Image: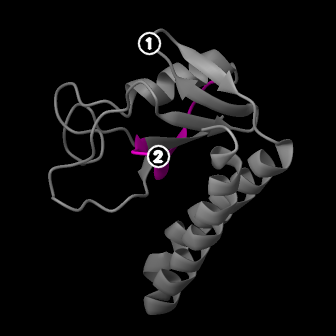
Protein backbone atom coordinates (compact mmCIF):
# COMPACT_ATOMS: atom_id res chain seq x y z
CA UNK A 1 0.00 0.00 0.00
CA UNK A 2 1.30 3.46 -0.91
CA UNK A 3 1.26 6.17 1.79
CA UNK A 4 2.10 9.80 0.98
CA UNK A 5 3.39 11.67 4.05
CA UNK A 6 2.81 15.40 4.61
CA UNK A 7 4.38 17.42 7.42
CA UNK A 8 2.36 20.29 8.82
CA UNK A 9 4.13 23.62 8.62
CA UNK A 10 1.96 26.40 10.11
CA UNK A 11 -1.38 26.35 8.30
CA UNK A 12 -0.19 24.34 5.33
CA UNK A 13 1.25 20.92 4.59
CA UNK A 14 4.48 20.01 2.81
CA UNK A 15 4.66 16.72 0.92
CA UNK A 16 7.68 14.91 2.35
CA UNK A 17 7.81 11.44 0.86
CA UNK A 18 6.02 8.39 -0.44
CA UNK A 19 6.24 5.13 1.51
CA UNK A 20 5.60 1.85 -0.30
CA UNK A 21 4.52 -0.36 2.59
CA UNK A 22 4.45 -4.16 2.49
CA UNK A 23 1.05 -4.02 4.24
CA UNK A 24 -2.48 -4.29 2.82
CA UNK A 25 -4.08 -3.38 6.16
CA UNK A 26 -4.57 0.39 6.50
CA UNK A 27 -3.58 0.56 10.19
CA UNK A 28 -0.42 -1.48 9.61
CA UNK A 29 0.46 0.63 6.55
CA UNK A 30 0.08 3.89 8.50
CA UNK A 31 2.16 2.54 11.39
CA UNK A 32 4.84 1.41 8.94
CA UNK A 33 4.92 4.85 7.27
CA UNK A 34 5.06 6.56 10.67
CA UNK A 35 7.94 4.36 11.89
CA UNK A 36 10.01 4.88 8.76
CA UNK A 37 9.56 8.67 8.78
CA UNK A 38 10.98 9.06 12.29
CA UNK A 39 14.56 9.73 13.33
CA UNK A 40 15.52 7.25 16.04
CA UNK A 41 19.13 6.29 15.39
CA UNK A 42 19.86 8.58 12.44
CA UNK A 43 17.79 10.27 9.75
CA UNK A 44 15.04 8.51 7.81
CA UNK A 45 15.75 10.82 4.87
CA UNK A 46 19.49 10.12 4.58
CA UNK A 47 20.90 6.90 3.20
CA UNK A 48 23.41 4.89 5.19
CA UNK A 49 21.96 4.71 8.71
CA UNK A 50 19.55 2.53 10.69
CA UNK A 51 16.53 4.79 10.05
CA UNK A 52 16.82 4.82 6.25
CA UNK A 53 14.46 2.45 4.41
CA UNK A 54 14.53 1.68 0.69
CA UNK A 55 10.70 1.69 0.66
CA UNK A 56 10.68 5.41 1.49
CA UNK A 57 11.18 7.69 -1.48
CA UNK A 58 12.36 11.05 -0.26
CA UNK A 59 10.59 13.71 -2.32
CA UNK A 60 11.08 16.96 -0.43
CA UNK A 61 14.55 18.47 -0.99
CA UNK A 62 17.02 18.44 1.87
CA UNK A 63 17.67 22.11 2.51
CA UNK A 64 20.15 21.96 5.39
CA UNK A 65 21.85 18.67 4.63
CA UNK A 66 20.88 17.22 8.01
CA UNK A 67 17.70 15.45 6.96
CA UNK A 68 14.01 15.91 7.54
CA UNK A 69 12.30 16.05 10.92
CA UNK A 70 10.33 13.11 12.27
CA UNK A 71 6.63 12.73 11.59
CA UNK A 72 4.55 13.93 14.54
CA UNK A 73 1.05 14.75 15.78
CA UNK A 74 -0.81 16.93 13.27
CA UNK A 75 0.98 15.60 10.19
CA UNK A 76 -1.12 13.92 7.49
CA UNK A 77 -0.86 10.70 5.52
CA UNK A 78 -2.85 9.94 2.39
CA UNK A 79 -3.61 6.50 1.01
CA UNK A 80 -6.11 5.21 -1.52
CA UNK A 81 -8.42 4.74 1.51
CA UNK A 82 -8.37 8.39 2.57
CA UNK A 83 -6.50 11.03 4.50
CA UNK A 84 -5.35 10.41 8.06
CA UNK A 85 -3.98 12.78 10.68
CA UNK A 86 -1.32 11.61 13.12
CA UNK A 87 -3.08 11.72 16.50
CA UNK A 88 -1.60 11.49 20.03
CA UNK A 89 -2.48 7.78 19.85
CA UNK A 90 -2.80 6.29 16.38
CA UNK A 91 -4.41 8.04 13.42
CA UNK A 92 -7.64 9.95 12.89
CA UNK A 93 -9.41 9.71 9.53
CA UNK A 94 -10.04 13.12 7.98
CA UNK A 95 -12.97 13.40 5.61
CA UNK A 96 -11.70 14.42 2.21
CA UNK A 97 -13.61 14.30 -1.07
CA UNK A 98 -12.82 11.07 -2.93
CA UNK A 99 -11.97 13.13 -6.02
CA UNK A 100 -9.15 14.83 -4.09
CA UNK A 101 -7.83 11.47 -2.87
CA UNK A 102 -7.95 10.04 -6.40
CA UNK A 103 -6.20 13.12 -7.79
CA UNK A 104 -3.48 12.90 -5.13
CA UNK A 105 -2.92 9.20 -5.87
CA UNK A 106 -2.77 9.78 -9.65
CA UNK A 107 -0.31 12.64 -9.34
CA UNK A 108 1.82 10.71 -6.85
CA UNK A 109 2.03 7.85 -9.36
CA UNK A 110 3.11 10.31 -12.09
CA UNK A 111 5.63 11.87 -9.74
CA UNK A 112 7.10 8.50 -8.81
CA UNK A 113 7.39 7.60 -12.49
CA UNK A 114 9.01 10.96 -13.29
CA UNK A 115 11.39 10.70 -10.34
CA UNK A 116 12.63 7.31 -11.54
CA UNK A 117 13.18 8.58 -15.08
CA UNK A 118 14.41 12.10 -14.22
CA UNK A 119 18.04 11.02 -14.10
CA UNK A 120 17.72 9.64 -17.65
CA UNK A 121 15.98 12.76 -18.92
CA UNK A 122 18.27 15.36 -17.36
CA UNK A 123 16.88 18.90 -17.39
CA UNK A 124 13.66 17.80 -19.14
CA UNK A 125 12.99 15.32 -16.33
CA UNK A 126 13.66 18.00 -13.71
CA UNK A 127 11.21 20.36 -15.44
CA UNK A 128 8.58 17.60 -15.73
CA UNK A 129 8.96 16.70 -12.07
CA UNK A 130 8.58 20.36 -11.03
CA UNK A 131 5.41 20.61 -13.14
CA UNK A 132 3.94 17.49 -11.51
CA UNK A 133 4.88 18.88 -8.08
CA UNK A 134 2.89 22.04 -8.79
CA UNK A 135 -0.14 20.06 -10.01
CA UNK A 136 0.02 17.77 -6.98
CA UNK A 137 0.33 20.65 -4.52
CA UNK A 138 -2.63 22.48 -6.09
CA UNK A 139 -4.85 19.40 -5.97
CA UNK A 140 -3.99 18.33 -2.45
CA UNK A 141 -4.09 21.85 -1.01
CA UNK A 142 -7.67 22.21 -2.30
CA UNK A 143 -8.67 19.11 -0.38
CA UNK A 144 -6.66 19.84 2.76
CA UNK A 145 -7.87 23.42 3.09
CA UNK A 146 -11.38 22.05 3.38
CA UNK A 147 -10.33 20.05 6.44
CA UNK A 148 -7.93 22.40 8.28
Q: Position of residue 3 (x, y in %)?
A: 59, 38
Please tell me how crowded label 1 is: few (under 14), some (14-19), or many (20+) other residues with Cα within 10 Å. Answer: few
Magenta highlight on residue 114: no
Q: Give the residue at the far top of this rendering.
A: 89
Query: Tag 2's secondary structure?
Result: loop
Left or right of 77? Residue 26 is right
Left or right of 23? Residue 101 is right
- For residue 128, above or below residue 54: below
Task: Find residue 136 and report its image quarter.
Answer: bottom right
Q: Position of residue 140 (x, y in %)?
A: 65, 54
Q: Position of residue 106 (x, y in %)?
A: 74, 58
Residue at x 64%, y 45% (from the top left corner) = 144
Q: Which mark is residue 76?
A: none
Q: Which residue is mark 1?
A: 88
On the question of residue 32 being in view, the answer is yes
Residue at x 20%, y 44% (from the top left corner) = 48
On the question of residue 109 being in view, the answer is no
Segment colored magenta: 8-23
Task: Find residue 35 and report its image quarter.
Answer: top left
- Judging depth in this view, the residue of 71 and 88 nearest the camera is 88
Q: Earlier in the sequence, mark 1 or mark 2?
A: 2
Q: Given contact means CB atoms under 8 Å apart, are the residues at marks 1 and 2 in contact?
A: no
Q: Give the residue at the far bottom of this rendering.
A: 123
Please tell me how crowded label 2 is: few (under 14), some (14-19), or many (20+) other residues with Cα within 10 Å. Answer: few
Q: Position of residue 129 (x, y in %)?
A: 53, 75
Q: Which residue is mark 2?
A: 11
Query: Tag 1's secondary structure?
Result: loop
What whole-number distance in Å separates the C-alpha atoms at marks 1 and 2? 19 Å
Residue at x 51%, y 86% (from the top left corner) = 127
- Judging depth in this view, the residue of 86 and 17 nearest the camera is 86
Secondary structure mostly seen in the magenta stretch: strand
Amino acid sequence: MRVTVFHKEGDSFERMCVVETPNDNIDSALEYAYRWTNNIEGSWSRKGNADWNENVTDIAPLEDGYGHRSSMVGDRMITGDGQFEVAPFGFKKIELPQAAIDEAEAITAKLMEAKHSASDLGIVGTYFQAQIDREFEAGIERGMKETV
